[in-house]
Image: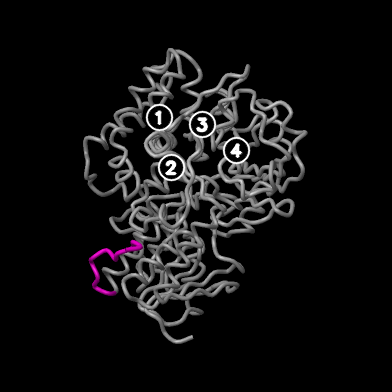
Amino acid sequence: MTDVDAVVVGAGPNGLAAAVTLARAGLRVHVFERNSTIGGGARTSELTLPGFRHDVCSAVHPMALASRFFREFQLARRVELRLPPASYGHPLDGGRAGVAYRDLERTIDGLGADGAAYGRLMRPLVERADEVAQFTGGNLLRVPSHPVTAVRFGLRALEQGSAAWNLRFSGDVAPAMLTGVAAHTILRLPSVASAGAGLALGVAAHARGWPIPVGGSQAIVDALAADLLAHGGTITTGVEIMELGELPRARATLLDVTPKALLAMGGSRVPARYARSLRAFRYGNGVAKVDFALSGSVPWANHELRTAGTVHVGGTRAEIAAAENAVAAGRHATSPYVLVSQPTLVDGSRAPAGQHVLWTYTHVPRGSSLDQREAVTRQIERFAPGFRELVLDASSRTALDVERYDPNYVLGDIAAGEPSVRQLLRRPVLSPDPWRTPVDGVYLASSSTPPGPGVTGLNGWFAALSALRHEFGVRAHPNLSLD
């Protein structure tokens, strides 16, 4: 291969976001992907029966409409993003449930006695959703552009991340809803980091909704790849890069990999002090994933849940905290927290007529080899009696299977690094520009950098902007729009 201006390793959302940004700046860009198809954490494939298209990793994209990168890229004009009537729901025993509608006031009305308290918690943030997204979608070391909103957000995260998390509520529905979104982080509960993530997700749920891409998450990476190719970029699949020396000569190298992989690829080129920081980077606990092909829609006992694109299954705040804290202690939860999405509620193209795909995962200790199909089925059946009879087929992967699919998910950690407060500040190092490494021309562009996990493209975008400044003297942001 002839020399290029920049090479990117990894064709997931972050690697492709980086490549698109560089190509839009007029650079010659080449991407290498170890798998035979592009996508990373955003692939869609027939995992069960023919005609049933499942999202291999990510399915719902709470931050896609808030991501500055995707807004500049005009993702909503390139991919059809459908919004379920309810962003998420949370079942409780006895057929009760909390439902987070895009309409905050409707959500408040459904929470009874705790509605007003939920409104006081969320409304000041929802009214400033763009400012919240800007604060949470960048490097937390930088001075926030909207300090008042940052303080409001921080105080609420401190409350919901501490032993005071129940003080404003009298019932159990609103606290369960908040815990369901906070538990996305796979952290001990309560914690400030999980509370902050939960608030950010909750704000997105009410301000914009949690979109589901028609055709699956693959549609997002396909749109990125199409733009890259249209602007002169190239992609090679089926090639795993083990060492930096295997790459063609380029002024900038952007790696959509973990610090662990960067150490292996860089070898002696990685300075000792930086290498120590990379070795100290901590990976979190993992997920076990189960995908179902169903003969009908999930029969949730509470009918309002049948309009929710995502359902957090696990019961009360105390039950979910117990499950997540068991995982944090290295144990499998006896009554696990389960994330559930039925994309076919809004996208009938994913399954044969009248049938459905169901996407689920549960949290497990890092490196778990335990198949969780029965545990997940049992939890869903608890809140949706008759679910078991609808299952036509299922595909189950352990945490170790998840890592085999994508080495960025170390021991099953889909966040590519524990998203604790410490590691949101040091991701993977404490720096105003953590994407730039001390290896000449090498940048880290994965979820192991700010702003952390999620299909936002921001990690790759920030890495590309840093490379443009330092390697090419380009300070203006490239135009990413269709116009």
Find residue 428 and report its image quarter.
bottom left
- Identify residue type, mark 1: Asp
Side of 61 where 357 appears, left or right: right
Instruction: Give the camera-side residue of 199 and 95.
Output: 95
Q: Are marks 4 and 2 in contact (CB under 8 Å)?
A: no
- Identify residue type, mark 2: Ser
Q: Which residue is mark 3?
A: 180
Mark number displayed over residue 103? 1
Q: Earlier in the sequence, mark 4 or mark 1?
A: 1
The mark closer to the camera, 4 or 1, is 1
Q: Which residue is mark 2?
A: 420
Give the SS element for disc 2.
Answer: loop
- Identify residue type, mark 4: Val
Q: Which residue corresponds to the image point at 37% horizontal and 56% vertical from the top-left?
A: 74
Whole-angstrom CA distance, mark 4 to mark 2, is 24 Å
- Identify residue type, mark 3: Gly
Whole-angstrom CA distance, mark 2 to mark 3, is 17 Å
Give the SS element for disc 3.
Answer: helix
Query: In the rendered structure, which segment of residues is drawn in magenta?
Result: 472-483
Find residue 359 and report its image quarter.
top right
Q: Earlier in the sequence, mark 3 or mark 4?
A: 3
Whole-angstrom CA distance, mark 4 to mark 1, is 22 Å
Farthest-out residue, bottom:
2
Q: Is residue 139 above or below residue 159?
A: below
Q: Which residue is mark 4?
A: 340
The mark closer to the camera, 3 or 1, is 1
Side of 430 where 350 appears, left or right: right
Q: Which residue corresponds to the image point at 25% horizontal and 36% vertical from the top-left?
A: 149
